[in-house]
Amino acid sequence: MTAGTPAGLTPVLKALGLSGMLDTIEARLAEARAGTLGHAEFLQVLCEDELARRDAAKITRNVLLLERSFDLGPLCVGESVQLGLGMAGVAAAGCGG
């Protein structure tokens, strides 16, 4: 964080679970100071930045989970599969059934 961001803002954003806003706040503050963003637009764009960051993190997390699930293959326990495949999926997965 640079001198343009209020010092007390970091702990507040972290407490609210919005610390990702710290990544783009300097650029958005510069836009606001240049007059290209009004107060409401500044807040809206900052929130949109946070939503985009969270969406990107969610996609990355889901891709990693999907890759991991393919690496593990079906997890057989007795006569069932822990992937919600039903009996047809149990047989196809080679777990008996």
Image (cartoon, rainbow, N blue to C red):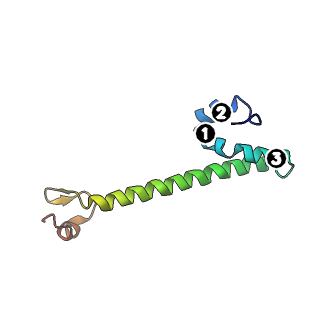
Q: In the drawing, what numbered circle is on residue 10? A: 2
User: Going 28% across and 61% down the picture, which residue do you hit?
Assistant: 84
Q: Are marks 2 and 1 in contact (CB under 8 Å)?
A: yes
The kind of residue tagged 1 is Ser
User: Going 26% across and 65% down the picture, which residue do you hit?
Assistant: 85
Q: What is the distance, in whole Å, between disc 3 and disc 1 at their CAs?
A: 20 Å
* Residue furthest top in the image: 8
Q: In the drawing, what numbered circle is on residue 27? A: none
The foreground one among 84 and 72 is 72
Residue 22 spot, x, y in % from top left: 65, 41
Q: What is the distance, in whole Å, between disc 2 and disc 3 at their CAs?
A: 19 Å
23 to the left or right of 90: right
* Residue at the spot of label 3: 32
> Which label's residue is closer to the chain start, 2 or 1?
2
Q: Please tell me whether mark 3 sits on a helix, a strand or a loop.
A: helix
Q: Quadrant of the C terminus?
A: bottom left
The kind of residue tagged 2 is Thr
Give the quadrant of residue 63. bottom left
